[in-house]
Image (cartoon, rainbow, N blue to C red):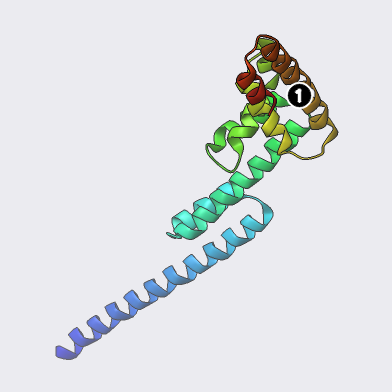
Amino acid sequence: RTAIWIGIIAALVLLGALAQICRICRAELHRRQAEALVEAGAYAHARKLYDGIGDAEGVAHCNAMQAEEVYQEGKQFLMAGDCEGARQLLASLGSYKDTAALLAACGWQEALAHEDTEALIEAHRGFQSLGQNSTCQDIIKQISERLFTQAEELAAAFKLEEACTTWE
């Protein structure tokens, strides 16, 4: 009778060990699949796998990679002159990198129409951060010309401090 109980306990221990080995193997398989998905750029699916195995570092890495991808795509839209497309992409990024400046750049046409000096200055900074793209340079030129005109008008009204701030 004791031998039967020892056999049952041994079988249960063996089953527990086999179950743990299966969990470890499955987690490793999911980790490898997630890594392959990250390499392929399928960050959302990889994040689900990492989350399923409790890998917080993998989830964070997927989030960072996806944010960078959206950020770069938003910059490409902005450099191509598609401000609305860029705004839609960049708005989801919150405070990621210089997203705030790029979003301000997205509103440059509205700022120009409303002669909003502060918004134009922010848009100018946003486009300057994009580099030497010809579309960006054309927009920078338009914004600069409007800011210069505003600075001249302020200087003519003897608002020299505001004129200097506008033109800087």
Q: Is residue 138 above or below residue 38?
A: above
What residue lies at 58% left-to-right and 65% top-to-bottom? 32
Q: Position of residue 105 (x, y in %)?
A: 67, 28
Say which quarter of the image contains residue 5. bottom left
Q: Position of residue 107 (x, y in %)?
A: 65, 22
**Element carrying mark 1:** helix
Residue at the right extreme? 134
Residue 107 seen from this side: no
Name the residue carrying label 1. 144
The quarter of the picture where the C terminus appears is top right
Residue 114 seen from this side: yes
Q: Nearer the viewer, residue 85 or 131?
A: 131
Say which quarter of the image contains residue 90. top right
What residue lies at 66% left-to-right and 19% top-to-bottom? 163
Say which quarter of the image contains residue 73. top right
Q: As drawn, is 23 to the left or to the right of 33? A: left
Residue at the bottom extreme? 3
Q: Is residue 40 above or below residue 78?
A: below
Disc 1 marks which amino acid?
A: Ser
Q: Nearer the viewer, residue 109 or 45?
A: 109
Q: Nearer the viewer, residue 152 or 5?
A: 152
The quarter of the picture where the N terminus appears is bottom left
Q: How many marks?
A: 1
Residue at the left extreme? 1
